[in-house]
Image (cartoon, rainbow, N blue to C red):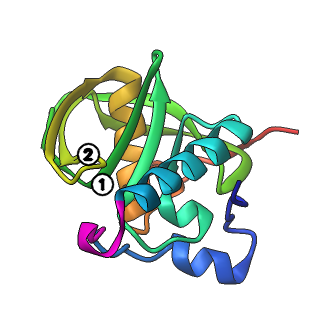
Amino acid sequence: MAKIWTINNKDEKKLLRRKLKSFDFSQHSSKEINKLIKEMDDSMQKANGIGLSANQIGLDMRIFVARWDNKFFAVFNPKIEKRSKEKETMEEGCLSIPKQYGEVSRSENIVLIGQNKQGKKIKIRAWGMLATIFQHEIDHLNGKLFTDRMKRGVKLRGLE
């Protein structure tokens, strides 16, 4: 299991704030890819998370994993193809910003495109919490944190 990187560490924060490189399937065997997915999923579950991006465990590659509503997702090179104009505001937290929460407004519905673990193109329609999770993780892959999306003047809520 990998350690979760946080913004509290100056060196770790550098990778968390950088746009990640595309995942190159030609550079990894299917065994390596399965091991990577398992390591990310195990790390996410151990930390009681519902989503985890590669840079949160120190890797510079565009992949995230997520678990929601008894479904598991491992998405490589994801992009949001469409997003609704309708927004939903939810309280978000992040494994890389320990014990801090804040309200973020995001699109209610999205269409996500990317690749599965075999490198085949996939398209996922997501709404509600799943759409929020996907948008949060794609932000990570682009070097953004949920705090960047909060309204100006709104403070984080701490949890002890």
Q: Is residue 108 above or below residue 5?
A: above
Task: Decide if residue 78 is on the left or right side of residue 9.
Answer: left
Picture quadrant of residue 110: top left
Which residue range is magenta in the image? 23-29
Q: Quadrant of the N terminus?
A: bottom right
Q: Which residue is mark 1?
A: 76
Identify the residue at horizontal 53%, vertical 70% (top origin).
Answer: 16
Residue marked by disc 2? 116
Is 94 placed above or below 13 here?
above
Quarter of the rendering occupied by the C terminus: top right
Closer to the camera, 151 or 132?
132
Does 16 appear in magenta?
no
Q: Measuring 39% from the left and 69% from the top, which residue is drawn there? A: 61
Look at the picture and state if 23 lies above or below 139: below
SS type, badge 1: strand
Element under label 2?
loop
Instruction: Say if mark 2 contacts mark 1, CB within 8 Å.
Output: yes
Q: How many marks?
A: 2
The front one of 35 and 100 is: 35
- Looking at the rendered structure, the kind of residue marked 2 is Asn
Farthest top residue in view: 69
Which quarter of the picture shows residue 116?
top left
Question: Residue 108 sits in which quadrant?
Answer: top left
Query: In the displayed structure, does residue 27 sit left or right of residue 10?
Result: left
Pick whichever, 34 or 58, lies toward us: 34
Q: Residues within 10 Å of mark 2 (few under 14, many from 20)?
A: some
Q: Position of residue 118 (x, y in %)?
A: 24, 50
Amino acid under label 1?
A: Phe
